[in-house]
């Protein structure tokens, strides 16, 4: 019988603790205009600390920093990164990415590709709004034709199939 009343008191204390938090939040919203939600898109919140989309980085000579180690491709859980190796035009011993593309329809934005990259060739840019109105356009080229500034270009279906065929040997 003693345990019964002790359990009732413990349950009541827990209930009051939870209700006090609820009432504080309600009081703040109703009387002080301290809303806990953001009215998007009229208002925006600070998202600088969160991850955005994957962006390729380039060196001063205009070529991609990627050395085609395939670390990002292996680390990507959904397998949305495709990469094609090639020789650097100035130094034939050095390998660079001729094409580097990413399918944002599959991307989980988990940052594993960035962590796996030893050469700091890709980063997560803090841009969170990049709308696509057609799912087929979400497959974008990050590096194309080894030129700086060719970010976010569409790949044709044929180019996608060719790169996926070349990628199969790495898995």
Image: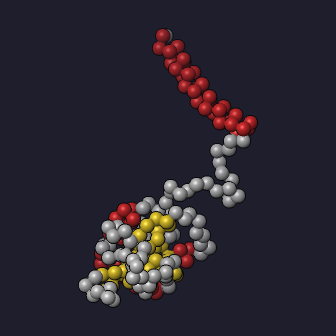
- What's the residue at 41%, 76% (across, down)? 58
Rendering coords of residue 42 (x, y %): 70, 58
Rendering coords of residue 110 (x, y %): 44, 60
Residue found at the very far front of the displayed protein: 60
Q: Is residue 74 visible?
A: no
- What's the residue at 59%, 65% (across, down)? 129
Which of the 4 image quarters holds residue 46? bottom right
- What's the residue at 70%, 39% (across, down)? 29
Residue found at the very far right of the displayed protein: 31
> Residue 166 vs residue 132: left or right?
left
Rendering coords of residue 150 (x, y %): 49, 82
Q: Is residue 114 visible?
A: yes
Can you say whether 155 is above or below 27 in the image? below
Residue found at the very far left of the displayed protein: 93
Which is more toward the observer, 121 or 78?
Answer: 121
Which is more toward the observer, 55 or 104?
Answer: 55
């Amino acid at each position: 019988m003693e345990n019964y009343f002790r359990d009732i008191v413990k349950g009541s204390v827990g209930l009051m603790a939870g209700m006090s938090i609820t009432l504080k939040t309600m009081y703040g919203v109703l009387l002080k205009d301290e809303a806990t939600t953001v009215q998007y898109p009229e208002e925006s919140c600070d998202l600088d600390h969160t991850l955005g989309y994957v962006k390729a980085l380039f060196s001063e000579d205009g070529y991609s920093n990627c050395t085609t180690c395939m670390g990002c491709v292996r680390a990507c859980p959904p397998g949305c990164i495709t990469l094609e190796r090639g020789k650097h035009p100035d130094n034939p011993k050095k390998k660079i990415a001729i094409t580097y593309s990413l399918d944002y329809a599959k991307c989980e934005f988990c940052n594993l590709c960035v962590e796996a990259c030893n050469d700091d060739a890709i980063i997560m840019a803090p841009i969170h709004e990049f709308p696509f109105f057609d799912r087929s356009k979400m497959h974008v080229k990050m590096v194309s034709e080894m030129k700086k500034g060719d970010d976010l270009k569409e790949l044709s279906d044929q180019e996608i199939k060719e790169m996926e065929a070349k990628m199969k040997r790495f898995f």
